[in-house]
Amino acid sequence: MRSLLTVAVILLSTLSCHTVKRAAQTTVAVADTASVFIPVKALRTDSLAADSIRRVASALARIDSNRIGFETFSAKIKVDYKDSKDKNLDFNAFVRMRKDSVVWVSIIAALGVEAFRVLIRPDSVMIMDKLEKTIKYTTVSDLQRITQLPFDFTALQQLILGNPLYLEGELQSFKENGAAVTVFYSGDRFRHLAQFLKPAISLSRSRLDDTDLLRKRSADLEYDSYGTVAGRIFSGVRRIRLAEQQTVDVSLEFKQVEFDLPLSYPFSVPSNYKLK
């Protein structure tokens, strides 16, 4: 139970989703020019700096417009987990969610037996252990306090969809060439390097490092196997490496992905279950 919850907490709480802040000035590196220090007011001129700034703004607008939108979402996810203490887990998770409302997860263990069912709402978390016949109630705020990580319900939904997260702070560098767009942000809590592949500007890699060097906390996320699902460009395979006191590697393979279909979120607690 603890191992599975570790996977869930790490995946759900590594990041938080924020709106990109416009910096008063930024360093821009574009493929056909040297790195230059450009004030935002240069947008009002016809200089090379203004052209570079416009290219940056255009690329960032495309990144933002490519975010996956949804009303409901469902998928089967094959999860492979390995950590530096030689713990290995593999299981299937069925995920259903409604925008801004609920995330429902059913975790299937060996022999197709449902081991856990989880219901997450913006301010509450319920975890049903169907093997031990227990129920646990907690809150997102409690998980934030325990893990000392900034996350919220919106971040969880965006993480599952594969949308870019934590594009916040000051834009330190920008690079665009024929194959990719790469941005680097420096914020109060994390430094974030994100790469997007052309032509669709699909998120390829997201590398975050804690600004607190004493914690040595980092997250490296890779996105692969893109395909079109219900008109949306969706990453079918994710690889995540998390490091702090130990290293954790998680692979997620999405199957049976569906958008905007009617869904139910069953979570009935039997009377004989004990409160944990």
Image (spheres, grey):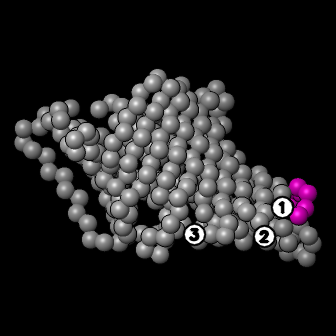
Which residue is painted at 53% across and 25% down in the image?
245
Query: 128 or 147: nearer the eye?
Result: 128
Magenta highlight: main SS: loop
Count the labels in the image: 3
Question: Is the residue 188 above or below the residue 158 in the image?
Answer: above
For marks 3 and 2, the one nearer the N-term is 2
SS at badge 2: helix
Residue density around tag 1, few if under 14, some if 14–19, many if 20 or more, within 10 Å? some
For marks 1 and 2, the one nearer the N-term is 1
In the picture of the structure, the residue carrying the numbered disc 1 is: 30
- Residue 98: tell me if it is visible: yes
Q: Alpha-carbon distance for marks 3 and 2?
A: 17 Å
Which residue is painted at 78% across and 63% down in the image?
177
Residue density around tag 3, few if under 14, some if 14–19, many if 20 or more, within 10 Å? some
What amino acid type is highlighted by mark number 3? Asn
Residue 142, x across and y down, in percent: 37, 38
Horizontal side, residue 34 vs residue 8: left or right: right
State which quadrant residue 35 falls in: bottom right
Quarter of the image with the N terminus is top left
Magenta segment: 30-38
In the picture of the structure, the residue carrying the numbered disc 3 is: 66
Horizontal side, residue 40 vs residue 92: left or right: right
What amino acid type is highlighted by mark number 2? Arg
Residue 10, x across and y down, in percent: 45, 39
Quarter of the image with the C terminus is top left
What amino acid type is highlighted by mark number 1? Val
Question: Is the residue 74 above or below the residue 61 in the image?
Answer: above
In the picture of the structure, the residue carrying the numbered disc 2 is: 55
Residue 201, x across and y down, in percent: 64, 66
Q: Does the magenta stretch include residue 240?
A: no
The reply to whether discs 3 and 1 touch (Cβ–Cβ < 8 Å) is no
For marks 3 and 1, the one nearer the N-term is 1
